[in-house]
Image: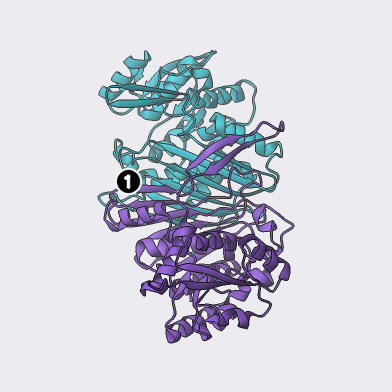
Chain colours: A cyan, B purple
Amino acid sequence: MIGVAVLGYGFMGTTHLAAWKMMEGCSVLGLWGRNRAKLEEAASRYGVEPITELDNILKNDKIEVVDICTPTYTHVELAVRALEAGKHVLVEKPMALNLGEADRMIRAARKNGRKLMVAHVLRFFPEYMRVKELVDGGHLGEITSLRAWRGGPAPEWSPWFMDLEKSGGVAVDLAIHDVDYAIWVNGGLPSRVYAKIVNLVHKEYRVHDFALITLRFPTGSIAVIEANWALPKTYPFTMKLEIDGSKGVVQLDNQTPIPLKMWTGDKVEGFAPETLPWKPGVHPFPLDPFYREIRHFVECIIQDRKPITDGEEARKSLATCLAAVESSEKGAPVTVGG
Amino acid sequence: MYLVEKVRTGFLGVAHFHADSYAQSLKTIPQAELVGVFDRDKGLAHEFSQKFSVPTYDDMEKLLKICDAVVITSENALHHEYAVKAAEEGKHILCEKPMTTTLRDADELVGLVEKKRIVFQMCYVMRYHTVTSLARDLVVGGRIGRLLVMVGTNKLNRSLPLLRAWFTDKSLSGGGAVMDHTVHLSDLMRWISSAEVVEVYTEIGRNANPKLQVEDSFLTTVVMGDGSIGHIDGSWTYSSGHYTWGDVTLELLGSEGVLQVDAFRQNVYFISSEKPDDRLVWHYYGCNPDLLLVKDFIQCILGGGKPRANVYDGRQGVAVTLASYQSSMEGRPVRPG
């Protein structure tokens, strides 16, 4: 039985918690957070023990895995402490706010011989997995371009998202999903990045809410990634992908293929078992991307394998997003890598 | 009895597919008369002449003598020569995009058209599409607040440019997808925002069709004079099995809302079952912008109106396109000339 502690009781914390509760061979031994009232509410909702002292997790030998779902700016300290304490660490994306922090985490994992995985969940969405299979199977031939679109209303429910210093803004927090995916299907880092990353409508915050990132890979394949928090509150969370290749084209979006819709009163709700909108407790978990992602991490621990998005791999998308921000500030293309 | 005034219209070059659609449209307009066709390729001219029952002319000068107006749907690189000849003769001109392949030619044409006081209309059909026109009205009417971002695609089924060899012959087309498919979106962005493109950054990627001598895949980021941001993907990279010819989509983000356009999305789906690999095919039933474009041209000539897209709009399209090539070559953002 693998003992697990989840840090953070926000949207991602409770999402992961629900998935951990379904995981065979694992037992959630505690939930940690700074706000006692919120911690106890979430812990009782999921039937886990609330823990207020981090040391009680780090010193507990029964806890092998620490799953960090706290705000981005707290990742590095928590991850390094957990790794130093001999825990395997799953950490939400983005892994950190800068490459110095990312490298500290990577070094701590290496030094302590523990697994570090960054939760780039897009790699576990069934439609994105299917596209990757088509690419790997050679069905698209050589990839020539990728268009990705991701957006919804700004996450104002958690104020730290709306603070550039704490979340990195829409490029580092949101676009990183598709940047990671583009790196995955293109087989590595882009060579050049050009971007427009701005505060479009949320003038009351110091944060980027719109990113338009163009990538060029060493193969000559190109990509454009739009990440958008500048949308009206009624806008459904939407993701779209299109990849063109020498042999074919693949397209997906999460809004059209909704296999079940429900109208009740003045509301309409869509349900797709494997995709968004995801509601804890509503969907069958084995198809859920969060379940798959965590399952992968557990298998990597049991079988001593390298997680698909370990620290080194996740560093690539972070480096690319940071280069995009730099490009936007400079008004010029920026070279990544090195 | 009263005189019905007809605009006698000739075609100078029919190498572009759009010639057929414009001719069909002209045929339905009572105030227009199709009087002849010239093409340097006699075979093409003959084909067109058969299809639309119009006489062919081997000598462009002779055709010009009997015309009030011309439609120029030749290879891109010949637009300038044909337009200058027609303008010198005082003929009204409907010109396929891109207007010219060099900025010098474009500027010369702007001067000539102004001097000759003729109607010169660019075939920027998207200004005539009811959906993009509606989008512009909504934006201009303030419905999404201040316009901040415009992201567009005008992608093309990759098999189409192969149907006429000149499209992929740089000496006749001036270039590939960048030359062919930058202007519809850059023009829509200018039209909707009432601002000029002041900065262009383009990545030209490796080709989806490596056999082409011209580029077929590119991504362009633009900045408008009012500070708004735009993005253009006009790649010829949709699969040859794509459900339709391509698309025109435009996302318009404003301070108070967002508007998304998929201009050619009105289709019925048809699935044949003759062969095992038959696939879904879309049959379009939406607005026919070509007809509205040609009607406007005729009306401008008869009624003295101003076309929605004129010679200067043509010039600005050329400037953005050429800046795009320069940016790609130099690896930096470029200000259009």
Q: Which residue is mark 1?
A: A163
A24 and B212: which is toward the camera: B212
How many numbered discs, if any?
1
Residue at the (34%, 26%) spot, across then down: A268
Give left or right: position of B223 versus A203.
right
Question: Residue B2 sits in which quadrant?
Answer: bottom left
Relative vertical location of residue A226 with respect to residue A271 in this rendering, above or below = below
Q: Chain of mark 1?
A: A
Q: Mark 1 is on which residue type? A: Asp
Residue at the (64%, 60%) spot, across then down: B51
Q: Residues within 10 Å of mark 1 (few under 14, many from 20)?
A: some
Question: Residue B277 sits in which quadrant?
Answer: top right
B220 and B36: which is toward the camera: B36
Whether residue A149 is visible, yes or no, is yes
Image x and y of residue A158, in percent: 31, 36
Image x and y of residue A275, in percent: 48, 28
Whether residue B214 is visible, yes or no, is no
Residue at the (61%, 56%) spot, across then down: B217
Q: Quadrant of the C terminus of chain A?
A: bottom right
Relative vertical location of residue A145 with respect to residue B318 in this rendering, above or below = above
Image x and y of residue B285, in percent: 49, 45
B13 and A122: which is toward the camera: B13
Relative vertical location of residue A210 with respect to residue A313 in this rendering, above or below = below
